[in-house]
Amino acid sequence: MFYVYILYSASLDVYYKGFTSNVKGRLESHLLGKSEFTSRANDWTLVYINEYETKQLALIEEKRLKKLNRTSIQKLIQG
């Protein structure tokens, strides 16, 4: 399975969108500063996650999420 996720950093007041097959490992990587963008903060929290059967479907959804504005992201997170 593959997962599309959104992280939020309160200190930066920013959302980060990504995809992975290992959510726990990827979040740990973000928190340890191993990703260039997310290394600017260490308070990332997982605020949204969705599961996909194929990598292709997850990538399509990740690209869609990256095009959303902040209001649309917040509505998605709130359900």
Image (cartoon, rainbow, N blue to C red):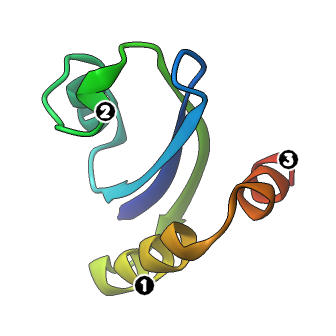
Q: Residue at x 54, y 15 (%)?
A: 11
Q: Quadrant of residue 53?
A: bottom left
**Distance in Å between CA atoms under marks 2 and 1:** 22 Å
Mark 3 closeness class: few <14, some 14–19, many ≥20 residues within 10 Å:
few
Amino acid bearing label 3 = Gln
Mark 2: secondary structure? helix
Q: Which dot marks residue 78?
A: 3
Q: Earlier in the sequence, mark 1 or mark 3?
A: 1
Amino acid bearing label 2 = Thr
Q: Residue at x 42, y 59 (%)?
A: 3
Determine which residue is flagged by label 1: 60
Mark 3: secondary structure? helix
State the residue in front, 46 or 40: 40
Q: Mark 3 or 2, which is nearer the eye?
A: 2
Determine which residue is flagged by label 2: 38
Q: Position of residue 37 (x, y in %)?
A: 27, 39
Quadrant (top left, top right, bottom left, bottom right) of the N terminus: bottom left
Mark 2 closeness class: few <14, some 14–19, many ≥20 residues within 10 Å:
many
Q: Which dot marks residue 17?
A: none
